[in-house]
Image (cartoon, rainbow, N blue to C red):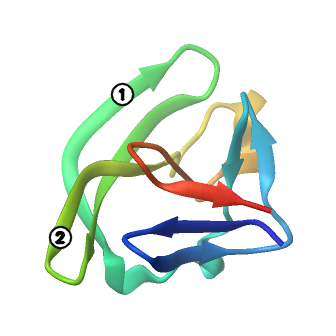
Amino acid sequence: MPKAIWNDHVIAESADTVMVEGNHYFPPGSITSAFFVPTETQTVCPWKGTASYFSLEVDGHQNKDAAWTYAEPKEAAENIRGHYAFWKGVTVSE
């Protein structure tokens, strides 16, 4: 089962991730929301839409903008609506 791990903590885990462009997108109910802090960062993908970012805070350490989600994706990316993906040192293992 895919797990997202940072700072020795599981921050998301689900057998129902969606793979897009090499990233596992975890469903909203699979994340440990206590580790997620919204930021002002946004990026725009031509086919997915606007992504909103979250920093991860675990044991007093912060990983700025390490997670993102598409709350209102374009039609082509509807299958990842509200799902979360990771980068910046977050390890995703299966």
- Residue 13 visible? The answer is yes
Residue at 64 percent of width and 31 percent of height: 74
Q: Secondary structure at mark 2?
A: strand
Task: Determine contact: label 2, label 1, CB under 8 Å.
Answer: no
Depth check: give the residue in front, 73 or 30: 30
From what the image shows, is residue 60 above or below residue 24? below
Q: Nearer the viewer, mark 2 or mark 1?
A: 2
Q: Secondary structure at mark 1?
A: strand
Residue 14 image-quadrant placement: bottom right
The percent coordinates of residue 6 (x first, y second) are: 43, 66
Q: Which residue is mark 1?
A: 43
The N terminus appears in which quarter of the rendering? bottom right
Q: Residues within 10 Å of mark 1 (few under 14, many from 20)?
A: few
Amino acid type shown at disc 2: His
Q: CA distance from mark 2 to mark 1?
A: 24 Å
Residue 66 left/right relative to 71: left
The percent coordinates of residue 82 (x first, y second) are: 58, 58
From what the image shows, is residue 19 above or below residue 45? below
The percent coordinates of residue 23 (x first, y second) are: 67, 40
Residue 55 left/right relative to 49: left
From what the image shows, is residue 26 above or below residue 7? above
